[in-house]
Image (spheres, rainbow, N blue to C red):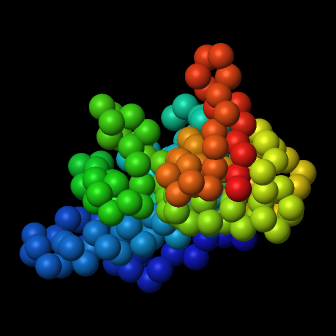
Amino acid sequence: MAFEFPRIHNFPPFYTQQPNEQTWAAQRTQWISLVLAYCAHHRVWVLNNRGLALSRGDVEMLDEEQATEDANGSDMEPLFENKGIDRRLDVGVVSLIFNEMVSNGDAAFVNKKDTSQIFVYWHRPDDWAAKILEWVEATGQSGVVLTLYELAHGDLSLKQEFHGIHPQVLETALQVLVKRGRAQLLKDEDGKIAGVKIQ
C-alpha cells in the first residue's frame, strides 16, 4: 500500500525554508511529522538527507547506490521531493530538520561527526522498550535469556511491530530497560551484546 502524503506536500512553498521564524517553526513541525509518518509506513530505520532509506524492514544497512535501487524498485515515493510540482527540499534545510528531530528525541545521528544520516524513532526508544517488555511478559519469557536475534527476527516476535528492528535501535531501547532496572545485558568476550534478560 502506497504512503499517502498530506496535502501540504503539493504546496510549493513547503519546499523552501520560510523567512518568518514562526512560519518556519510550523514548517519544521510539519516536516518532522511527515518524516515520522513516512518512515513508520515504510519501516525506515535509517534515513539520509537526500531522503533515501539506508535501512528499512529487516535490512540493516544499504549504501546510497543500493538505497536508490531499492527506492526505484519499490512503491516508495521520494520523501524530500515532489516531482509533480518540480520541488525538492534543499539538503541544508533537511539538516536543520534532522537537527531538530535529534534535539526533540525523534531521531539520533548514525554518526555524530556526519549529520547526514539519522536513526528515525517513529517510536521513541521508551516506546520500543515498553512494547518489548509487554511482549516478554505476555509470552512468559521474563527472566529468560534472549538473543538480540530472537527479539528482532525470531518466530515468536514475527507479529510484533518491533520484528525486524534495526540492531542499534533495539540496543537503545534495551538500554532504557536497563536504566529502569528491568533488563540485564549479557556481553560476549568482545564486549558486544550477546543476549538480554528482561525481568
Q: Is residue 175 visible?
A: yes
Residue 187 in the image: above or below residue 184: above
Q: Quadrant of the N terminus?
A: bottom right
Q: Quadrant of residue 195?
A: top right
Horizontal side of residue 105 vs 165, given as left or right: left
What is the x, y in percent for residue 91?
Answer: 30, 48
Q: Quadrant of residue 116?
A: top left
> Considering depth in this image, is 168 or 42 the residue closer to the camera?
168
What is the x, y in percent for residue 176?
Answer: 52, 54
Horizontal side of residue 141 vs 31, given as left or right: right
Residue 49 in the image: above or below residue 18: above
> In the image as oriented, which residue stretches furthest toward the bottom?
7
> Considering depth in this image, is 85 or 143 the residue closer to the camera?
143
Tell me which residue sits at (51%, 75%) in the image: 5
Q: Is residue 90 visible?
A: no
Tell me which residue sits at (45%, 51%) in the image: 51
Horizontal side of residue 97 vs 158, given as left or right: left
> In the image as oriented, which residue stretches furthest toward the left?
20
Tell me which residue sits at (78%, 56%) in the image: 142
> Considering depth in this image, is 188 or 42 the residue closer to the camera?
188
| Number of numbered discs | 0
Residue 166 in the image: above or below residue 99: above
Q: Quadrant of the C terminus?
A: bottom right
What is the x, y in percent for residue 4?
Answer: 58, 76
What is the x, y in percent for residue 125?
Answer: 52, 58
Tell me which residue sits at (25%, 78%) in the image: 26
Horizontal side of residue 108 vs 73, given as left or right: left
> In the image as oriented, which residue stretches furthest toward the top?
189
